[in-house]
Amino acid sequence: MLTIREHKGKLEGLTVVIVGDIAHSRVARSNIWGLRKMGAQVIVCAPPTLMPVDMDSMGVQVCRRIEEAIPEADVLMVLRLQKERMQQMLLPSLREYSVYYGINSSRMEKAKKEVLIMHPGPVNRGVEISPEVADGSRSVILDQVTNGVAVRMALLYLLGQR
């Protein structure tokens, strides 16, 4: 959320789209809680097999088609597709996931010009996000990495003071 505030100046009133493996993501749940608390609208988008059944109760909008969610996004948070969970046959293939939910240049043509692209990493390039989007001018993925290290260091310092 620090990266969003650095680039957007606020969280309140923003629309954040979270796309990917919502069902298995701690990042998704914690961000949904925090973003909603700070006044952002949250839209989640995933295949039905990667979407928890309780999403409506979390106060988010559920979207099944990424093409409908992208134009609404001030921030597009792409989650890692957890390949280690794919033995459960939750998706037909990584290729099919990429075709229907992958963030690529053609999908980004429908996005707001000032949309931020985020990804908590590690990135499966070419699956959930194309390299040109991950490395593009709208991406703040490297800022997330930098801020993540600083935040973790600060938390360890504070915990060590007890």
Image: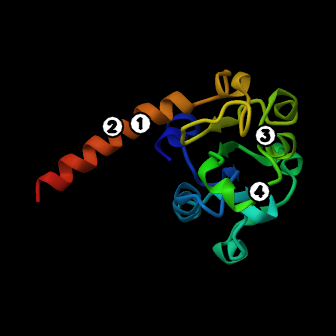
Determine which of the numbered discs, if any, sits on residue 102 in the image: 3
Q: Residue at x 73, y 65 (%)?
A: 51
Q: Give the x, y percent position of residue 10.
A: 55, 46
- Dot 3 or dot 4: first in sequence order is 4
Q: Give the x, y percent position of residue 25.
A: 58, 58
Mark 4: which secondary structure?
Answer: loop
- Foreground tag (1 vs 4): 4
Determine which of the numbered discs, if any, sits on residue 147 in the image: 1
Label pair 1/4, CB-CB below 8 angstroms: no
Q: Give the x, y percent position of residue 81.
A: 66, 47
Answer left or right for 36 relative to 132. Answer: left
Residue under pointer 2: 150
- The colour scheme of the drawn protein is rainbow
Give the Cα separation between the discs numbered 1 and 3.
Answer: 25 Å
- Dot 3 or dot 2: first in sequence order is 3
Q: Amino acid at mark 3?
A: Gly
Answer left or right for 87 relative to 160. Answer: right
Mark 1: which secondary structure?
Answer: helix
> Which quarter of the rendered picture does the C terminus lie within?
bottom left
- Foreground tag (4 vs 2): 4
Give the Cα separation between the discs numbered 1 and 2.
Answer: 5 Å
Direction left: furthest residue:
162
Q: Amino acid at mark 4?
A: Ala
Direction front: furthest residue:
87
Answer left or right for 116 relative to 94. Answer: left
Q: Nearer the viewer, residue 155 or 48?
A: 48
Q: Amino acid at mark 1?
A: Asn
Q: Residues within 10 Å of mark 3 (few under 14, many from 20)?
A: many
Q: Is residue 2 above or below residue 29?
A: above
Label pair 1/2, CB-CB below 8 angstroms: yes
